Each structure stands twice: as C-alpha cells, then as structure tokens.
Image (cartoon, rainbow, N blue to C red):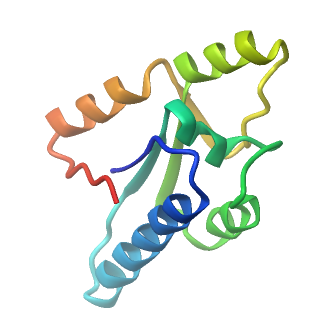
Amino acid sequence: ALQISDNDPQKMNTVLNVAANVARHYSSIGEEVEIRVVAFNAGLHMLREDTSPVLERLTSFEQSMPNVSFAACDNTVDAMAKKEGKDIPVVAMAEHVPAGVVDLMTLDEAGWTIIRP
C-alpha cells in the first residue's frame, strides 16, 4: 500500500513510479502483487478530477495496471467540500473509504506493507 498525503506533483509521480516499478518487478518474476494507493489530506488532490496534476497517468494506470487500485478518503472529501463549498469530483476508478488512515491501518493489520514514498 502506498500513501499519498501531500499536494505535491513530484510526490504523486513518485507514488505512481513506485507502483509501476513494484508491479513490473513482481511480474518479471512471475508473481502477482496487489498495490493500493491511499490518498488522504492534501494528497487527495491526486484523485480529484478538477485538480489532479497526474490525471493522465491515472487513466493510463487504469488501462494498463489492473493490479493497482486507488482509495480516496471520504473524511478528506467531506472536509474539502465544506471548505470549498462544492462537491469534490473524485476520479471514477477510486474506491471511497471512510478514512484513509484507517484503510492503511486495516491493510497493515492484514499483512500489507505500507510505504510512504
């Protein structure tokens, strides 16, 4: 699981690079790996249709890397909606989770490795 909690295009691209590299590595040795990118706090901008600096790459991931999934923190979505006074458009490929941090904690308890690139 990869965490993104900063509104920083470089970090967002790093998260996507790490996901691609991990997927390629395991594929090259004939193993399956499931990768989940969890976005919360300012990192939610990665999954926003209106503000994502990596929107094009997300579309590419959806098409070429089915083993990479994305999770959007609903606590953050709600906070941004309240602050901005509008609905927050999240990319359709992202699963909504009640709390991004809790999602990471649950994955950790289930034996996932949590990475913050």
Image position of 34 with respect to 44: above or below: below
Residue 92: x %, y % from top left: 73, 41
* Image-based side of 45 in relation to 116, left or right: right
Instruction: Tell me what residue is drawn at x 44 percent, y 21 percent.
Output: 99
Instruction: Tell me what residue is drawn at x 28 percent, y 84 percent.
Output: 30
* Image-based side of 84 in relation to 58, left or right: right
Which quadrant of the rendered structure holds the C terminus? Answer: bottom left
* Image-based side of 109 in relation to 18, left or right: left
Residue most extreme to the bottom = 28
Q: Nearer the viewer, residue 114 or 95?
A: 114
> Which picture quadrant has residue 13?
bottom right
Image position of 69 with respect to 104: above or below: below
> Which picture quadrant has residue 105?
top left
Residue 20: x %, y % from top left: 46, 74
Instruction: Tell me what residue is drawn at x 42 percent, y 50 percent.
Output: 36
Residue 74: x %, y % from top left: 57, 20
Q: How many marks?
A: 0
Residue 91: x %, y % from top left: 73, 43
Instruction: Tell me what residue is drawn at x 31 percent, y 53 percent.
Output: 116
Image position of 60 with respect to 110: above or below: below
> Which picture quadrant has residue 32?
bottom left
Q: Nearer the viewer, residue 109 or 6?
A: 6
